[in-house]
Image (cartoon, rainbow, N blue to C red):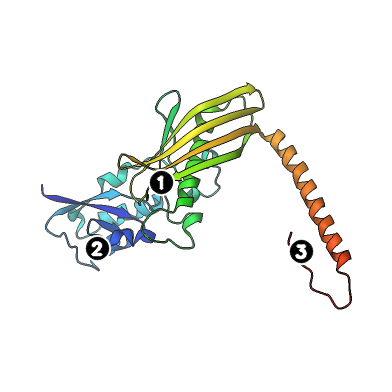
């Protein structure tokens, strides 16, 4: 069978889809309902999943494809074998579109992997998409979620405790652009300190891999603490900061309390 292959991406990656071998979801939908004549009418097009697509969009696409007069022109089988998106309990996100990763897999005792799964409706793409590449801040968030998911699934004590995570420091190196196609995120751990029962300390390297090379690499030092312990610390710090800030405002009000001076800066 003669066939050609195209990458399917979400509409917000339209600048990347301007090339011949890529297509946006809206463009494909227009072809399926006959609004736009397919440029590959004599050859079946195999569609490869790219970034930006949600599970609901894909389900709708499958239904549209079933009733399309040109369904024989498109092979959607690769779109039906997507990795499973990680649960919110692992990504620590309430809305599913903000989870950027798949369920984590263990490759070895110290190496774990997730797939990058960008839904274009996510919080980091709501405003605008600049250029053709995936934004660096989105890759950082995906790396953070990968560590949380791996830690929750494989590394934390299974004692019924709820843990919160605190990042102590991050180092990042952007080697080259990442684009809206398949990418893997690998997490390796050079230190996991479990000597304290209510806290686990981690040191980890995270690499975002695309087309066999590392696009972005991170090093994280972070800790997982039992919920009650960190909640108490957070509450104490919040009270201290609030009292300090209000005391500073009160001092400024007292210093600037003059009849001809009504503009007071409340910024530190």
Toward the viewer: 157 or 196?
A: 196
Toward the viewer: 147 or 77?
A: 147
Toward the viewer: 54 or 209?
A: 209
Comparing marks 2 and 1, which lies closer to the viewer?
A: 1
Q: CA distance from mark 3 to mark 1?
A: 42 Å
Please tell me which of labels 3 and 2 falls first in the chain. 2
Please tell me which of labels 3 and 1 falls first in the chain. 1
Dividing the image into 4 quarters, which one contains the C terminus? bottom right
Q: Position of residue 83 (x, y in %)?
A: 37, 40
Q: Position of residue 119 (x, y in %)?
A: 43, 52
Q: Residue at x 16, y 53 (%)?
A: 44
99 sits to left or right of 10: right
36 sits to left or right of 185: left
Q: Which residue is mark 3?
A: 266
Q: Residue at x 72, y 42 (%)?
A: 234
Please tell me which of labels 2 and 1 falls first in the chain. 2
Q: Which residue is mark 2?
A: 31
Q: Is residue 206 visible?
A: yes
Q: Residue at x 14, y 60 (%)?
A: 41
Q: Which residue is mark 1?
A: 117
Q: Tag on residue 204?
A: none
């Amino acid at each position: 069978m003669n066939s050609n292959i195209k990458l399917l991406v979400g509409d917000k990656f339209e600048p990347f889809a301007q090339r011949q071998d890529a297509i946006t979801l809206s463009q494909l939908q227009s072809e399926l309902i006959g609004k736009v004549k397919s440029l590959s009418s004599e050859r079946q097009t195999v569609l490869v999943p790219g970034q930006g697509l949600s599970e609901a969009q894909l389900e709708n696409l499958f239904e549209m494809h079933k009733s399309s007069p040109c369904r024989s022109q498109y092979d959607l089988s690769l779109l039906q074998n997507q990795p499973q998106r990680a649960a919110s309990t692992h990504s620590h996100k309430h809305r599913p579109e903000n989870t950027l990763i798949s369920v984590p897999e263990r490759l070895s005792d110290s190496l774990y992997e997730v797939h990058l799964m960008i839904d274009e409706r996510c919080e980091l793409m709501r405003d605008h998409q600049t250029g053709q590449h995936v934004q660096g801040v989105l890759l950082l968030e995906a790396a953070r979620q990968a560590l949380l998911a791996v830690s929750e699934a494989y590394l934390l004590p299974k004692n019924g405790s709820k843990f919160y995570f605190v990042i102590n420091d991050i180092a990042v190196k952007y080697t080259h652009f990442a684009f809206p196609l398949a990418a893997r995120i690998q997490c390796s751990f050079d230190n996991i300190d479990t000597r304290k029962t209510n806290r686990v300390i981690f040191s980890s390297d995270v690499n975002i891999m695309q087309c066999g090379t590392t696009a972005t690499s991170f090093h994280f030092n972070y800790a997982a603490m039992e919920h009650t312990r960190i909640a108490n610390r957070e509450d104490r710090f919040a009270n201290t900061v609030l009292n300090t800030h209000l005391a500073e405002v009160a001092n400024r009000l007292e210093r600037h309390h003059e009849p001809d001076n009504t503009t007071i800066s409340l910024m530190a």
